[in-house]
C-alpha cells in the first residue's frame, strides 16, 4: 500500500479546497480590519453554518465530473476531455445554484460555449488570466494514471475553455503539478524550487495537441512567444513567494507579499504561501488565507487543496468536513482517486 492511498490525498485535497472556499466566502471583498471586526481574531475563525461554497468548488466538481467521464471513455486526450468538461461548465452556467458571485470571465466564456457549433477557442477569453482558471484545476493533479503530457495538457485545456491568457494556462499547469507533488509526498520545504524548475523546463512548450490554434487569438508572433509570456509571469511570482518565505511573517496579510489573488499566478502563490507558513497546522493555514484583503475564497481553497494533498483526509476536523456543502460528491471523487 502506498503512502498516497494510506493518507487519502485526493479526499484531503478536495475537502480542504471546499472548506477553504466556505471559510473565505464571507470575507471575500473585505479588507483585513473589516474581517477582524466581523469574525474576531483570525486564528479563531469558525466555519460558517451552513457551510456554503462558491463557484470555486462548484466548478471544481464540474471539472471532476467531466474528467471522470473522459477517463471512463478511454485514454485521455484533448477531444475526449473537451466535450464533457465543456458540457459540465455549461450546466454549471445554467444552474440556479450559480448564484455565488461567479467570475465574469467564466460567465462570458460559458455563455459562448453553449453554442455547440462554436470552436472552444472562439469562446476562450484570451485577455483574461483570472484565478477562475486554476481555482478549479485540483482534480487534474489528483486523477491517477496520467502521463506528464496528459496532466499538463488537461490542466491547460480546462483553463483555456474560459481563460485563454498564457499566464492562466501556465498557472493552472503549475497548480495541478503542485497538488500532484504534494499528494506524492514531496517535501514542502523544496516545493517552490521544484515548481520553478518545472516552469523553466516548460517555458517554451506550447501544447498544440491540446490547445490547437488558441495562440493565434492573441497578438503574439509565435506559439512559443505566447506561452513563454505566461511562464515568465509565473516565475516572477514564484520569486516573490521565495522572498516571502525567507522572512516569514505569519501575522501579516499574505496578499502584501504575493498579491491579492484575483489573477491566476497570484492565487497560486498566495495560496501556497498560506500553506507553507503553516505546513503542520492546516486549519490555521485556511484561517490565514480566509483573513486576507484579496480573493479570500480562492486563496483559501487553493491553500486547502495543497494542505489536504500533503496531509491527507485526516488534516480536517470531522465536525467541519461533515457539514461542508457537496460533502457527498467531494468524498465520492476522493474515494475514486484515492483507490
Image: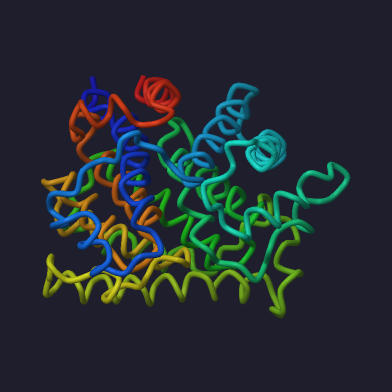
Question: Residue 52, percent across and down?
Answer: 40, 38
Q: Residue at x 33, y 70 (%)?
A: 238
Q: Nearer the viewer, residue 274 or 324?
A: 324
Q: Residue at x 20, y 62 (%)?
A: 36
Query: In the displayed image of the protein, which residue is found farthest to the front?
Result: 37
Residue shown at 37% from the left, 67% from the top = 294
Quarter residue 14 falls in:
top left
Q: Residue furthest right?
A: 117
Front residue of this view, candidates 54 and 162: 54
Q: Residue at x 12, y 70 (%)?
A: 248
Where does the N terminus fall, quadrant-wise?
top left
Residue 150 appears in which quarter of the rendering? top right
Instruction: Give the x, y percent position of residue 278.
Output: 14, 54
Q: Is 208 displayed left or right of 26 in the figure?
A: right
Q: Could you say where residue 124 lies in the image, as x and y percent from the top left?
A: 70, 59
Q: Is residue 294 above or below residue 153?
A: below
Amino acid at each position: 500500500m502506498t503512502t498516497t492511498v494510506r493518507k487519502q490525498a485526493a479526499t484531503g485535497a478536495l475537502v480542504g479546497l471546499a472548506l477553504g472556499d466556505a471559510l473565505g466566502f464571507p470575507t471575500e471583498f473585505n479588507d483585513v480590519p473589516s474581517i477582524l471586526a466581523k469574525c474576531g481574531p483570525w486564528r479563531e475563525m469558525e466555519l460558517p453554518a451552513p457551510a456554503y461554497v462558491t463557484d470555486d468548488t462548484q466548478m471544481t466538481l464540474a471539472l471532476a465530473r467531466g474528467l471522470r467521464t473522459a477517463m471512463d471513455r478511454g485514454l485521455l486526450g484533448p477531444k475526449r476531455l473537451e466535450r464533457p468538461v465543456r458540457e459540465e461548465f455549461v450546466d454549471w452556467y445554467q444552474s440556479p445554484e450559480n448564484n455565488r458571485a461567479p467570475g465574469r470571465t467564466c460567465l462570458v466564456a460559458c455563455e459562448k460555449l453553449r453554442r455547440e457549433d462554436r470552436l472552444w477557442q472562439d469562446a476562450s477569453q484570451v485577455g483574461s488570466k483570472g484565478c477562475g482558471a486554476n481555482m478549479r484545476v485540483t482534480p487534474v493533479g489528483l486523477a491517477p494514471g496520467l502521463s506528464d503530457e496528459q496532466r499538463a495538457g488537461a490542466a491547460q485545456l480546462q483553463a483555456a475553455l474560459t481563460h485563454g491568457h498564457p499566464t492562466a494556462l501556465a498557472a493552472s499547469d503549475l497548480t495541478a503539478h503542485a497538488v500532484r507533488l504534494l499528494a506524492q509526498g514531496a517535501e514542502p520545504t523544496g516545493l517552490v524550487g521544484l515548481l520553478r524548475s518545472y516552469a523553466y523546463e516548460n517555458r517554451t512548450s506550447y501544447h498544440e495537441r491540446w490547445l490547437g490554434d488558441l495562440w493565434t487569438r492573441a497578438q503574439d508572433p509565435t506559439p512559443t512567444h505566447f506561452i513563454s509570456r505566461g511562464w515568465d509571469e509565473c516565475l516572477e511570482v514564484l520569486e516573490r513567494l521565495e522572498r516571502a518565505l525567507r522572512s516569514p511573517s505569519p501575522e501579516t496579510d499574505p496578499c502584501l507579499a504575493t498579491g491579492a489573488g484575483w489573477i491566476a499566478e497570484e492565487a497560486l502563490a498566495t495560496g501556497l504561501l498560506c500553506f507553507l507558513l503553516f505546513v503542520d497546522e492546516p486549519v490555521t493555514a485556511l484561517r490565514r488565507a480566509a483573513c486576507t484583503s484579496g480573493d479570500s475564497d480562492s486563496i483559501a481553497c487553493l491553500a486547502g487543496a495543497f494542505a489536504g494533498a500533503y496531509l491527507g483526509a485526516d488534516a480536517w476536523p470531522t465536525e467541519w468536513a461533515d457539514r461542508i456543502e457537496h460533502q457527498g460528491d467531494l468524498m465520492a471523487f476522493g474515494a475514486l482517486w484515492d483507490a
